[in-house]
Image: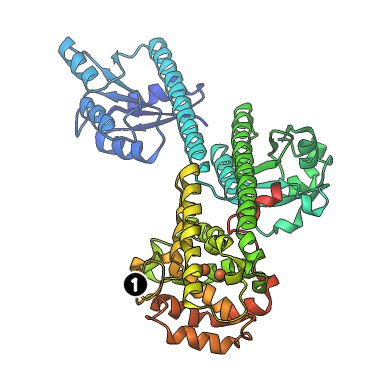
Amino acid sequence: MKSIVLAVDPAPTVHRLLRALLAAEPVEFMAVSDGATAMQTIERHRVDLVLVALALPDMSGFDVCRRIRENPCTATVPVMILADAVSRVEKVRGLQLGATDFLGKPIDPFELLARIRAAIRSRQMQRELEQQNSMLYQLHEFSLRLNSMETAEDTMRAALICALSLTYSSRGCILVAPETVGGDRLRVASMEGVCGREASDLSIRIGEPVSGRVYARNGLRVVNDSQEDADARAADVAFLGGPPFVSCSIPGGTGPLGVLNIAGRLMDSPYSDQDVRILRCVAATAGVAIESQQRRLRIDRTRDAALLGLAGLAEWRDPETGSHLERLRVYARVLAEGLREMPKYAGTIDPAYLQALFRSVPMHDIGKVAIPDRVLLKPGRLTDAEFEIMKTHTEVGARVLRSMAERAGHDLFLDMAYDIALYHHEKYDGTGYPTGLAGEAIPLAARITAVADVYDALVTDRVYRKAWPHEKAVSHIRENAGLHFDPDLVAVFVERADVFLQLKQDPANAPAAGPAEAPVAMLA
Ligand SMILES: [Fe+2]
Ligand SMILES: [Fe+2]
């Protein structure tokens, strides 16, 4: 891109002289006669150097200089003042206003040319510095954003957008090799700016051009030439509209995680070494983030499995309940998602809350491990004394979970599991146990669990009674709004009663994992 030099002088002879002087230079020359037009021109064009006469029809050259410096968009544009005779005081004033240089008239063409070249070179270096600063800032922002990414899908999209923005490209995609489909083909996991094509349109065998080879070699390939380079006709290059094109592997600790491809370069100009360095940097950062997400998810899954196993110990001794814990966590999530739509709960129930609820609900009855068989497995009604023993499962469970929280450090999940274990038998009207808490003093997660737990108990066969039909259970819960159950939750439950019926009849349809876990599995 050529540098733009603007001359501001009332004399057409000066315009002609400067135009002739700069004719052989790689610059675009513009000339105006007054200060107002000069300011408009500077605002509309990306001017790199202003040569301004001291005396103008509408303002002085100093005024032009001051206005340029006052505007943040033009503050760094070099301003050279051309003057017949400048006093020392005027020179100092001009420099104080931000003038870059002074040149006396009559103009010495050789000196002026040398000074213009120096000013333009300095301006170009300044622009490059600004550009690199902006890139560093964007890369820094990208790295910071990665910390809050929940899924590999989000991370890949952020990496793609960052890579496109930093390389002035408009189209891009990320390909990964999902283990689930045999692992010998790369498929599109994320794409941006690609029109008229579906992600499923592209599939590249590992080892084949261009992405498959880049992936296999954990390397990088630039295809700038559409005529001479045979790879220019490869399917993945065509998918992004042809060269210029770059494919860069996303490195992982034990091998590539995928491939980052970009194309649609501004003005179709070839990708430079700097673009390649930027792309490598973005891909490497994304790789670290994706691997860290995978590690975190593996730990989460292990923890979930261990905790579900622990919760299952109590269920194991009470085999009538079947897959109660699995059903319960899904019912609880349906209720929480419904509640989230009410403005009152929108600030409380976020994705982290939903995930913690899904994980902690199965802990609600872990205290039952301490209940003797004669009480826990008694086929008939419990006596008052036996019921008192049964009630203690809430406090036993809470004690276990509190000691876990104290060892692990309090977090949303363990604190919620504690609330649920202790308070899931409380009733909205204050007649529940163990503490007799009432209304919204009962933690929300425990109120949610109460509805889900009672519904599942009612529609499940017990030794002492047959399962109730779904409709009868719904009526029971509706009638107990404000008594046993939170009325808001009953409203959500009644509205979604069909979903409960469907989940009860076809539990296989219920998702088994937390909401943020599925997408990352693609890259595992
Ligand atoms: Fe319980
Ligand atoms: Fe239960």
- Residue 206, given in percent of the width and then of the height, sits at 82, 43
Query: Residue 342 falls in which quadrant of the image?
Result: bottom left
Query: Residue 127 falls in which quadrant of the image?
Result: top left
Which residue is disc 1 drawn over? 439
* Amino acid type, label 1: Gly
- Residue 165, given in percent of the width and then of the height, sits at 54, 41
In the structure shown, which secondary structural element does the residue marked by tag 1 occupy? Answer: helix
Q: Is residue 52 left or right of residue 143?
A: left
- Residue 339, given in percent of the width and then of the height, sits at 44, 71
Asked whether residue 336 appears in the rendered view, the answer is no
Above or below, 227 against 23 in this view is: below
For the point 74% across and 45% down, the residue is 237
Asked whether residue 76 appears in the rendered view, the answer is yes
For the point 78% across and 40% down, the residue is 210
Above or below, 398 against 132 in this view is: below
User: Which residue occupies the foreground of this view, 492 or 431?
Assistant: 431
Q: How many marks?
A: 1
For the point 25% across and 38% down, the residue is 36
Above or below, 282 against 19 in this view is: below
User: Callout 1 environment at 10 Å: few (<14), some (14 to 19), or many (20+)?
Assistant: some
For the point 27% across and 29% down, the residue is 69
Q: Is residue 360 left or right of residue 342?
A: right
Query: Residue 510 falls in which quadrant of the image?
Result: bottom right
